[in-house]
Image (tube, rainbow, N blue to C red):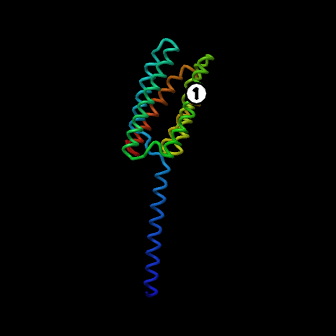
């Protein structure tokens, strides 16, 4: 083999090795990202949030207001879980995989804390704190889970947390408005964005 042929062979080998490394890098990035976050399901959750805000605002007692939001949370969670299962099946991204488990665990901690604190705050007559508490803890969970997902999920978590801080700094009477903007508006807009950019 001539010197020129050797140089061509080495150059070809180098290009092939670089292509292989890029393929491996892309594959690892995909496997480290939880892509089954539901876009349309998230938008559906936003519609539920907007409906809950309207219904809750018309309730004559604090107990009924709470009941509306708790029922809405259950419905929204069911929509989100169903949409996530369907998207995961379509993408071939098992929810029981390592990344799916990390996403679920990161999200679950703040949600369980939120449920527990809801009971404690309600029992101690702290109803005015609930909107801020829900927005902050949901945002924390979404942000933590978003570490294993697409950037839009992390941004959604931060946006919820910002609303939670604003809700804490404004009059309690505005609480339902902040919940509408968060669980309704933000969830709907980001859900549609995720559906468009990341499928379903």
**Residue at the location (43% across, 87% down)?**
1
Residue furthest to the bottom: 2
Secondary structure state at the residue bearing disc 1: helix
The foreground one among 79 and 63 is 79
Residue furthest to the top: 60
> Where residue 18 sits in the image (x, y, percent)?
47, 67
Q: Is residue 160 visible?
A: yes
> Where residue 61 sits in the image (x, y, percent)?
51, 12
> Where residue 107 sits in the image (x, y, percent)?
53, 37
Residue furthest to the front: 96
Q: Is residue 154 visible?
A: no
161 up-or-down from 18: above or below? above
**Residue at the location (47% across, 72% down)?**
14
How many numbered marks are there? Answer: 1
The foreground one among 197 and 22 is 22
What residue is disc 1 on? 133
**Position of residue 153 in the picture relative to residue 117 (left or right):** left
Query: On the image, which quarter does residue 122 sit in?
Result: top right
**Residue at the location (47% across, 30% down)?**
183
197 up-or-down from 9: above or below? above
């Amino acid at each position: 083999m001539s010197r020129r042929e050797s140089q061509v062979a080495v150059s070809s080998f180098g290009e092939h090795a670089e292509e292989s490394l890029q393929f491996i890098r892309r594959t690892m990035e995909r496997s480290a990202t939880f892509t089954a976050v539901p876009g349309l399901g998230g938008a559906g959750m936003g519609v539920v949030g907007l409906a809950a805000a309207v219904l809750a605002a018309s309730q004559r007692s604090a107990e009924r207001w709470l009941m509306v939001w708790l029922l809405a949370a259950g419905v929204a969670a069911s929509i989100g879980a169903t949409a996530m299962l369907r998207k995961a099946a379509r993408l071939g991204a098992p929810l029981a995989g390592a990344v799916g488990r990390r996403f679920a665990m990161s999200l679950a901690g703040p949600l369980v804390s939120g449920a527990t604190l809801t009971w404690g705050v309600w029992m101690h007559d702290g109803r005015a704190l609930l909107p801020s508490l829900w927005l902050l803890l949901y945002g924390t969970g979404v942000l933590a889970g978003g570490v294993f997902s697409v950037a839009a999920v992390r941004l959604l978590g931060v946006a919820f947390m910002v609303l939670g801080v604003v809700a804490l700094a404004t009059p309690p009477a505005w609480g339902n408005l902040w919940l509408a903007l968060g669980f309704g508006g933000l969830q709907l807009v980001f859900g549609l964005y995720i559906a468009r950019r990341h499928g379903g």
